[in-house]
Amino acid sequence: MMELLHRATHQIPMFDSCASSCKTRITIKGGGHCYFGNYNFNCSFGESTTSPQPTITREEQQSRVLYLHIPYLGYMLKGNASDGALFMSRLTNNSNITYVRTCNTMINGEIFNHVFIYPNPVLEQLNVYLPENSNQVKYAIMDVLGHELIKGEINNTMESIQVANLLKGVYFIRLYNSFEQTNIKFIKE
């Protein structure tokens, strides 16, 4: 019961107030708060007074976290789109977790929950990765005032857009089709 109260009063409000345009909250089934780190008596004692109790070992939980975290970091820190695709595949096909994924879309559809752009920041070429089943996706690159600077259509699962002529600064790429849209912020160096 305490774990559910903690989630409702701490984890969910923090997740909801996060300003990210696309965010994911993952719950490891059977896991516990203290299992994210090495053993600590005080943490473990406190957790022993909560309900429900962890049903997996510390090692199992850490293995499940790394299974998701390593490709996620490969995408976020290195801009590796294949790591991003691997993360999404592991996220959506994993019975050991539950997750909530919220992306800034008009309709929270499947296509734009699986989009990756890289590198970010970008110098000359912005790469956009879309899932295999997406079609008729258009894009518009906009400045912070919403002026459209570059427009086009994405015809492959991986599309490269030349942005070398943009001035240094913050921009958004709007991806859209007939049913949904998303805006992703990027920085031009």
Image (cartoon, grey):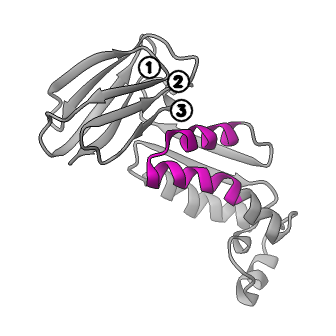
**Relative to 88, is 2 above or below?**
below
Work out which quarter of the rendered image holds the N terminus and state it.
bottom right
x then y, percent, for residue 100? 61, 43
Mark 1: secondary structure: loop
Left or right, 99 with reference to 82: right
What's the CA distance linking mark 2 and mark 3? 6 Å
Disc 2 marks a residue whose amino acid type is Ile
Write the residue at 20% across / 48% down. 189
Q: Nearer the viewer, mark 1 or mark 3?
A: 3
Q: Nearer the viewer, residue 155 or 50?
A: 155
Write the residue at 35% across / 37% down. 184
**Relative to 9, is 34 above or below?**
below
What's the CA distance linking mark 2 and mark 1? 8 Å
What span is colored magenta in the figure? 65-92
x then y, percent, for residue 45? 78, 85
Write the residue at 44% across / 19% down. 180
Chain-order first, disc 1 or disc 3: 3
Mark 2: secondary structure: helix
Q: Are marks 2 and 1 in contact (CB under 8 Å)?
A: yes
Mark 3: few/some/many CA within 10 Å (<14, 14-19, 20+)? some
Report the residue marked by disc 1: 180
Magenta: main secondary structure: helix
Disc 1 marks a residue whose amino acid type is Glu
Report the residue marked by disc 2: 111
x then y, percent, for residue 122? 28, 44
Chain-order first, disc 2 or disc 1: 2
Residue 67: say if magenta. Answer: yes
Report the residue marked by disc 3: 114
Residue 95: say if magenta. Answer: no
